[in-house]
Structure formats: C-alpha cells, structure tokens
Image (spheres, rainbow, N blue to C red):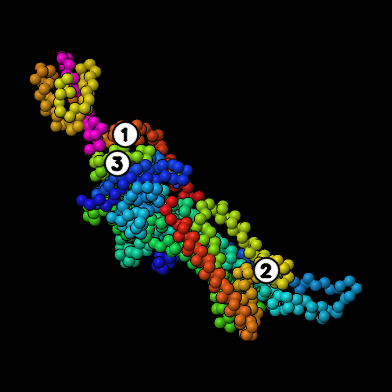
C-alpha cells in the first residue's frame, strides 16, 4: 500500500517559542483509517492544520495525497475534505445552501452536487431541517451538517478533528457506518482525532498517541495493546508451592504479581498461552479456583504512555465544551 | 476564479437581504441626510436681508441668494441637488467601509479556515467581498437617487439629463464603490477583531466626508484643506455626478473634466484593487 500521508520530523513552533508539534514522523496508508490520539493541547489540531495547509510548517516535511504540503498546497487542497474541531458552517445560510456552496467552491457540477447533497442530507437525517437556517440547528445537527459539507466533493482524504464530539450514540454509529462504507467502497483515507478511545480502537487500522507535541507510540490498536504488556490474566489457585517462577518461564509473560493465592500475569495474546498454563498447573497437582482474562483497552495504553487517562477527565467536560462552541455561535 | 468569487458573493448578498433592517437602514440613512440636512442647511438663507445700514431691495436679495447656488455650488438649482451628487458617493463610502467586515467574522468562526483549506484562489475571497459591497451600495444609491427626486425642493435633474448621463453617473459611483470597497477590504483581511475594524472605519469615514465637496464646495475651504479635498475620490466622484446631474448635456471643457474625473477614479479603483490583491495574498495564508 502506498503512503498517502507522510510526515517527517514535522515541527510547528508558534510565535512566542511555543513548540506545539515536535519532530513528529508517521505515515498513513491509502485507504486506511488513522487515529490521532492525545490529551488536550497535545498538538493534534496543529498537526492537522499543517497537513491541510492551514498552518505553515516550521521544519520537517509533510506530504498529503502525494504532494508536498509546503510546495504544492493547492494540489493538496483539491484532494482533501475537512471537518474542523470548531464548527464552521455558516449560520446565516440554510443547511442545503451550506452544502451547495461547498460544492461550488470545489467545482462539483451543479446536477451532480444536487443529487449527492440530497443523498448526504438524508444520510445524516437532516432532510426536514435542510431548508432551515443553520442558526436554528442544535449542536449535533451542525456537526452532522459539517460532516457532509466536507464530503460533497468526494475527497481522497478526509480529515476529521473530533468528528463525533457531542453526538449521540445512534448518530455516531450512523456516521461511522457511512464513513466506513466510503472507506471501503471509495478507498477514502481517514485521518481523525477523537477522545473516544473505544471508537478509535474499533474503527482505526492504526493509531498514534501524541503528547506534548511528540508521538509516544504508534501502530495498530492491537500492536499498541501488546506493547504496553498485553492482556491481564488473573488466576486464583488452591494453596501450594508458589507458581511465580513457573509463570515467568512461560514465553511472552511480562510481569507476574502474587497476592496470596492470586496471581496477576501480564501477557500478550493470553488465550494462546492458556492451554500451557492450565496444563502446567494441573501437572503440579494444583487446582484452579477462578480465572479471569482482561484484554487491555486503548485507555490503558493511553494511560501508560501519557500518564493520564482520558476517562479521568470530569465527565461533564465534553458537554460543556460542546455548549461553549454552540453558545459562541449564537452570539 | 469567477465561479468561486460569484458563489461567495451570492453568500454575502443572501446574508444581506435576509437582514431587512440592514437594507432598510442603508437606504434610510442617506435619505435622512439628504432630506434633513439638505432642507435644514440652505446656503442661500445665509445671506441676511440687511447688511448694516444697507438694505438691498428684495428682488436683488433673491438674486444674490440664488447666485450663491449657481456660482458657488456648481450651478445647482437647489442645495439638495448639490448634496445628492455628493451623498451618493458618501453612501458608497459608508457601505464600502464594512465591505470586509464579514471577513473578520469568518476568521472568528473558522469559516475562513475552510475557505483557505479549499483550492479556491485566495483573491476570490477578496473579490467576493468587494463585489458584494459594490452591488449592495449601488442598488441602494439607485433607490436613493429616485427618492431624492421626490423630496420637496429636492433633486432637480437638468432637463437635458439623458439615459447616458444616468449611466455615466452610476458608472462613476461604481468606480468610487470599487475603490473604497477594495481599500477597506484590504484593511480588513489583516484585522482580527471587529472592534478594530470599527475604529479604523470611524477614523477614516468622517475626514473623508468633510474633506470633500460632498457637503460644501471646495472653494469655501482653507487652502491646505483644498489640496486634500481635491484629491479625495469622494470629491471627484461628487463633482462628476453633479456636473452630469446639473447640466445634462456638457460643454467640451465640462466633458473633459468629467472624463478626467472618471479616469482619476478608474486609477484609484485599480490601485486599491491591486493593493487588495497583494494584501490578501499576504494575509490570507497559513498561520
Ligand atoms: N494559533 C496558535 N498560536 C499559538 N499557540 C497555539 C496556536 N494554536 C495552538 N497553539 C498551542 O499549541 C499547542 C497544541 O494545540 P492544539 O490545538 O494542536 O492541541 P490539540 O491536541 O488539538 O488539543 P485539543 O484536544 O484540546 O483540541 C497548545 O499548547 C496550544 O496552546
Ligand atoms: Mg484540537
């Protein structure tokens, strides 16, 4: 597969010597879903801005759709669609007018644009609202509109900065269904940031975690989960000789902790090691009282590499953030 | 380039007609100026009926009063006729002043970023604001022109005023509109806050109005101000439209003056457009 997005030592230093993105390198294969994760202020939006030609590159190189972002910005622009973090649909136009304006700016022929717009509007369930001014839309409706505005010209790469923030679960599911379909049927490449790690886990072919402007870890979600130590196996056995050494001898085991008769073992792909473990325990004449297997989530990976958990953030934070955006728009 | 500019211009115009208050005020404001100021301030009434011991006979007095208009105020039959020629240009100055205003909002609300991330020419963003402002300003000024005719003792067109004169007047105003819209949009592309824009506009508008022949003839000004007023495009636009309105068919020297004025305004429009294109190239780019 060819690398449709490539960043090499990409660096952004804002005025005042603030290094927002610090020698970041990664690549995204054409037709894949790439998740860019990181806590607030990590440099996600700044990276997207450089890739989408909205921010100048301080040093390093980036190419998008096989064009250099700094040297051929217009070629890059033709190939991309964007959903910015801060919504930017026009309040004083109707939903359909917003979509058709975008179509004109990207030179989509009128008749094709009309057909596509209708399809997209139905998809995100805005049919009834499409002739209303966006000023009367709810936060979620704006977000859905923003999504289809970014898709009307059928870009090759779709940049989504927090695309599902503030959407309800059903809408998120519908939107991801559609994006996955575009991804499959039209080979659309997706670069997205999100705070929903389960979403990234289940959707993304590969992810990178960025913190303080630096990429801490990258790979497919399962690779990352393996890297942080893999699955957690907890076994409670009948009393007898300590099994710590036995567990340590099993291939792949990263860590063993014993508390009384309970063992906590970190091992990638635990299910593959289970038969060996069970056989070993019965060979020693011991019985298993209880077993539990916990697959790590991206949350744990995130916690491990950033020292912070996205779940620790106050539960209302996203809502109030969304409210802030919406209310700012209603000035 | 043209398609994108037009699409963005239509966006501006939609926003405008959807705010009827803006359209209404845009027409109402110059009408108030013309009707109230034009009626309240009648320069011929400045001549007292007696000069100390000297008391000219009434018919002589009327003659003096009328000749103030004909001689000092470029031959205008009424003061409102004089004022309208100037106010149409001032109306365009006022609408042009905020031609770039929507850019400030678009920057705030992220819409500008979306435009910048699209493959449209950067100058389309600039030209759309200028064009929208010109269309708004000219449509208002055409209305104001006809309303001024209806005002009692108002705009008196020369009996020889023809369709060609009408077109020439509005072509002149078109150049004034392009010139000022480009100038103010060029300023707005760099402005990040609405307040800054208002301050800049306030700073420029009134001096441009008072140092012009829109309200009073240049000859009545002190020498230093005359120099400024003569190069002020508002004066040039006012003088050209006034000559056309008052005389209709022009003598050869008047024709030369009018053509010179139009050329001057064309140069002004070309210069500010050039400045606008350059500044938008510089300012509408990656952070
Ligand atoms: N225009 C700017 N000028 C100066 N500093 C900026 C600018 N934009 C962002 N920064 C700084 O760069 C850093 C990275 O910001 P960025 O918006 O990329 O973070 P993010 O990862 O998108 O965060 P979030 O999850 O909150 O959206 C922050 O410290 C921020 O203050
Ligand atoms: Mg961000």
Q: Is residue A57 left or right of residue B29?
A: left
Report whether mark 1 lies on the same chain as mark 3: yes
According to the picture, the residue beneath numbered tag 3 turns out to be: A208
According to the picture, the residue beneath numbered tag 2 turns out to be: B227
**Residue sitting nearer the eye, A138 or A299:** A299
Residue A196 in view here: no
- Ligand 1 quadrant in view: top left
N-terminal of the pair, mark 1 or mark 3, is: 3
Which of pointers 2 and 1 indicates the residue nearer the eye? 2
* Disc 3: host chain: A
Count of residue discs: 3
**Measuring 35% from the left and 47% from the top, which residue is drawn there?**
A60
Q: Note whether B30 is above or below B62 in the view shown.
A: above
**Measuring 24% from the left and 18% from the top, which residue is drawn there?**
A259
Query: How far apart are labels 1 and 3 at the CA level?
Result: 11 Å
Q: Residue furthest left?
A: A283
Give residue B17's position: percent from left, percent from top.
50, 64
Region rendered in magenta:
A223-244
**Measuring 34% from the left and 43% from the top, which residue is drawn there?**
A23
């Amino acid at each position: 597969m060819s690398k449709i997005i490539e960043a090499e030592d990409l660096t952004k230093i804002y005025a005042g010597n603030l290094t927002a993105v610090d020698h970041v390198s990664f690549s995204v294969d054409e037709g894949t879903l790439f998740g860019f994760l990181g806590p607030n202020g990590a440099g996600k939006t700044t990276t997207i801005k450089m890739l989408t030609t909205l921010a100048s590159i301080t040093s390093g190189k980036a190419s998008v759709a096989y064009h250099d972002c700094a040297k051929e910005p217009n070629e890059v622009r033709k190939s991309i669609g964007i959903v910015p973090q801060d919504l930017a649909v026009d309040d004083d136009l109707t939903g359909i007018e917003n979509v058709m304006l975008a179509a004109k700016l990207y030179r989509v022929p009128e008749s094709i644009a009309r057909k596509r717009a209708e399809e997209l509007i139905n998809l995100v369930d805005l049919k009834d609202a499409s002739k209303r001014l966006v000023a009367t839309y709810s936060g979620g409706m704006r977000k859905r509109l923003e999504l289809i505005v970014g898709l009307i010209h059928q870009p090759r790469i779709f940049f989504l900065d927090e695309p599902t923030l503030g959407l309800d679960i059903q809408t998120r599911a519908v939107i991801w269904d559609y994006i996955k379909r575009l991804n499959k049927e039209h080979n659309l490449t997706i670069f997205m940031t999100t705070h929903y790690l389960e979403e990234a886990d289940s959707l993304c072919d590969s992810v990178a975690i960025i913190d303080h402007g630096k990429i801490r870890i990258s790979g497919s979600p399962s690779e990352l989960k393996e890297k942080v130590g893999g699955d957690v196996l907890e076994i409670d056995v009948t009393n007898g000789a300590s099994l710590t050494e036995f567990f340590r001898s099993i291939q792949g085991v990263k860590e063993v902790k014993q508390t009384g008769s309970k063992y906590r073992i970190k091992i990638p792909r635990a299910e593959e090691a289970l038969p060996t473990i069970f056989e070993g325990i019965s060979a020693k004449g011991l019985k298993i009282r209880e077993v539990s297997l916990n697959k790590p989530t991206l949350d744990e990976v995130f916690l491990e590499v950033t020292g912070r958990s996205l779940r620790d953030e106050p539960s209302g934070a996203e809502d109030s953030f969304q409210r802030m955006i919406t209310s700012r728009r209603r000035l | 380039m043209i398609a994108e500019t037009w699409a963005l211009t239509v966006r501006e115009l939609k926003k405008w007609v959807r705010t009827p208050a803006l359209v209404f005020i845009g027409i109402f404001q110059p009408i108030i100026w013309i009707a109230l100021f034009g009626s309240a301030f009648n320069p011929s009434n400045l001549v007292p009926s007696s000069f100390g011991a000297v008391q000219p006979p009434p018919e002589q007095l009327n003659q003096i009063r009328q000749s103030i208009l004909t001689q000092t105020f470029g031959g205008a039959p009424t003061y409102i006729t004089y004022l309208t020629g100037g106010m149409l240009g001032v109306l365009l100055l006022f609408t042009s002043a905020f031609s770039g205003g929507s850019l400030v909002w678009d920057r705030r609300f992220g819409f500008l970023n979306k435009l910048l991330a699209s493959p449209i020419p950067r100058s389309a963003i600039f030209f759309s604001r200028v064009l929208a402002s010109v269309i708004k300003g000219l449509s208002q000024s055409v209305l104001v022109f006809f309303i001024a005719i209806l005002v009692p003792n108002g705009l008196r067109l020369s009996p020889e005023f023809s369709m060609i004169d009408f077109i020439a007047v509005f072509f002149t105003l078109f150049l004034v509109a392009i010139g000022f819209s480009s100038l103010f949009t060029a300023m707005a592309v760099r402005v990040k806050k609405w307040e800054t824009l208002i301050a800049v506009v306030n700073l420029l508008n009134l001096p441009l109005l008072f140092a012009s022949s829109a309200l009073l003839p240049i000859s009545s000004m002190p020498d230093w101000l005359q120099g400024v007023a003569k190069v002020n495009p508002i004066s040039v636009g006012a003088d050209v439209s006034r000559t056309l309105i008052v005389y209709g068919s022009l003598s050869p020297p008047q024709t030369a003056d009018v053509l010179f004025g139009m050329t001057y305004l064309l140069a002004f429009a070309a210069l500010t457009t050039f400045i606008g294109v350059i500044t938008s190239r510089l300012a509408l780019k990656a952070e």
